[in-house]
Amino acid sequence: MQCLFEFFIKLYLVLTSVLLKDVVSNELWRTVDSNGWRASSAPRIYWPPPPAESESNGYLRVRCNGGLTQQRSAICNAVVVARIMNATLVLPELDTNSFWHDESGFEDIYDVPHFIKTLEYDVRIVMNVPKITAQGKTKKLKAYKIDPPRDAPVTWYRTTALENIRKYGAIYLTPFSHRLAEKIDDPEFQRLRCRVNYHALRFKPNIMKTSSDIVNKLRSEGHFMSIHLRFELDMLAYAGCFDIFTPEEQKILLRYREEHFPEKTLDYRKRRLLGKCPLTPEEVGLILRAMGFDNTTWIYLASGKLFGGKRFMKPFKAMFPRLKNHSMIRSGELEENIRGLAGSAVDYMVCLLSDIFIPTYDGPSNFANNLMGHRLYYGFRTTITPNRKALAPIFMDREEGHASGFEERVRQVMLTHFGAPHKRIHPESFYTNPWPECFCQMKPRNHADRCPPNNVNDVLESRFQNKEDVEVEATNQTDSTS
């Protein structure tokens, strides 16, 4: 009798586990419950238009270094800084050569006319620093070069930077990655960041078309998920997680680390338990399988060149054979459109539009972090973020032969929020989670969360027009009394 009872208990647990897996995977294909919130980066207070070019405090040049999304956040910061200083922004420069080894500039990646038009009520943007005439000679105004402090507060730009731009007429902030503090008390500046990031920064038509073609091809097969797999040489060397590699591969990783990162004593087991090690492709596959996804799942893989060769992808492909990347879906002449930064831009758009997005390693200003915030803004689209620290002991137990209850333990870790509105807690980045500043509610409990009119430009244009009407009325009154 006891044996029969235990049998039914085990059967119940198995059936419950199977049903839970099906429920979890089916639910995740839908967007997350927004709790009445929707994206809105329109100003909530009077927002005066920028000064004319001749009336601004000077010209602001910036050099945005790093990868695609690090540059993207730097561009957002540059617009905010220009607004803070009442400066005219020169089209930001992208330091592509050092990172991607190509010569793409802002105009090769982004739609410049759209960028300038979208922000016309926020900042004045010009293509170049103007020429000046002095002592009968015409030459370009030379910008005074400054290396801004990392995470500089708004006060630094209102004092030191402002003094220099007024003194020299133009300043050149280089490098400009992480040069404005993420925490800004004024929510209107945060909303301006969102207007830049989610409205003004639109990729060029060829990039958008390539991305759209890939998404349509994947959608023709049904739902698809995208995975940003960080398993490249630079990330592995930075993480310092070498033990799973061959002695020869470890030498390569160690040499790269010594050349690019500060010296540090590394303990693989400790780092893994702290969640510092990127997930391997096999670990990602095991997580998905535990959550109920099977070998019919279509997956788009966004990654650079994976370190360690094909052997690390083999277990993943065995679990999920329907695996694609942009070069597998589109080839030939389109490959010319998606190299370097442009290739990263295509990956970005496909991941943004996918039904589910899974970042395997998140860090400051990287591809995954910005995408998580963009997907939140784009309609609370499902994002599955593995908790590497909580998962590490589960994987280590499995590797040591203690696999009992493995999938259930993984599910317990993974059943957290999947992209719903949630409070931003340090060290979570504003670019990862722009809630609540860039969201509103139609039926708010708090008046400050009430939604303004839908279209960002309509809001700004109406206020711009109202300001002109007030000025005209004031002028008429002055004329009539003079």
Image: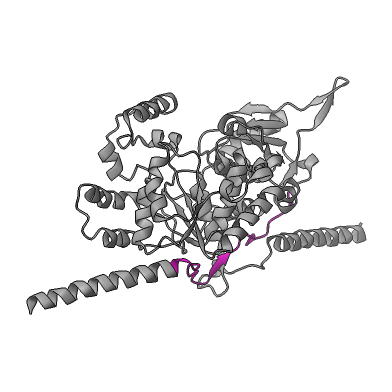
- For the point 86% across and 57% down, which residue is it? 475
- For the point 19% across and 53% down, which residue is it? 402
- For the point 33% across and 45% down, which residue is it? 275
Q: Is residue 46 magenta?
A: yes
Give the x, y percent position of residue 122: 70, 51
Quadrant holding the N terminus: bottom left
Give the x, y percent position of residue 143: 70, 28
**Quadrant assignment, res 175:** top right
**Quadrant assignment, res 250:** top left
Q: Nearer the viewer, residue 206 or 145?
A: 206
Say whether residue 121 is visible. Answer: no
- Horizontal side of 290 relative to 47 (left or right) equals left
Say whether residue 348 is visible. Answer: yes
Q: Nearer the viewer, residue 60 or 33?
A: 33
Task: Give the residues in magenta.
Answer: 27-50
Quadrant holding the C terminus: bottom right
- Horizontal side of 349 relative to 35 (left or right) equals right
Q: Nearer the viewer, residue 88 or 19?
A: 19
Question: Height in image: 305 above or below 403?
Answer: above
